[in-house]
Image (cartoon, rainbow, N blue to C red):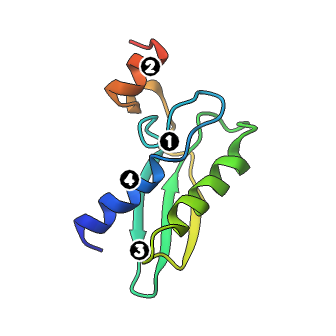
Amino acid sequence: MDKAMEESMMGALENVIDPELGIDIVNLGLVYGVHLDDEGRAGVEMTLTSMGCPMGPQIVSGVEQALAELPEVKDTTVNIVWNPPWDKDKMSRYAKIALGVS
C-alpha cells in the first residue's frame, strides 16, 4: 500500500467521531495502523479509550462505513487491540486543546 492510500484511509477515518468525546478517532490516537491488500481488503488496527467502552460497536461500524466510501476498499476488518493501551499522550494537539487536556 502506498503512502497516498494510507493518507486517504486515515482521512476517511477522521470522519468517525467518538460519540462520547466528540472528537474523531484519528486525532484521539485510537487508530494504530491501516492497511489495504491487492484485493481491496482493508484492515484497521485500533483501540478504544477503555475496555468497557459502550460505544465500541458504534465506532467499529463507523470505521467500516467510512472506509466503504473509498472506491479501492471492498471489505474492512477492524482489529481492536489493547496493547499498547490508549492514554491521553496519543491524542493530537488539536484533540488535547478541544478537550482541555494538557
Q: Which residue lies furthest to the left in this view?
A: 3
Q: Residues within 10 Å of mark 2 (few under 14, many from 20)?
A: few
Say if mark 3 contacts mark 1, CB within 8 Å.
Answer: no
Q: Is residue 61 left or right of residue 22?
A: right
Give coordinates of residue 27: x percent, y percent: 41, 36
The CA distance from mark 4 to mark 1 is 11 Å
The CA distance from mark 4 to mark 3 is 14 Å
Dot 3 corresponds to which residue? 36
Going by the numbered disc 2, the residue's amino acid type is Ala
Give coordinates of residue 86: x percent, y percent: 50, 35
Query: Residue at horizontal 35%, vertical 26%?
Result: 94
Nearer-N-terminus badge (4/1): 4
Q: Establish if 60 lies above or below 82.
A: below
Nearer-N-terminus badge (3/1): 1
Nearer-N-terminus badge (4/3): 4
Task: Look at the numbered disc 4 and give the secondary structure of its residue.
Answer: helix
Query: Residue at horizontal 38%, vertical 12%?
Result: 102
Q: In which quarter of the image is the N terminus?
A: bottom left
Q: How crowded is mark 3: few (under 14 residues within 10 Å), some or many (20 or more)?
A: many
Dot 1 corresponds to which residue? 25
Nearer-N-terminus badge (1/2): 1
Going by the numbered disc 4, the residue's amino acid type is Gly
Of discs 4 and 3, which sits in the foreground? 4
Dot 2 corresponds to which residue? 98
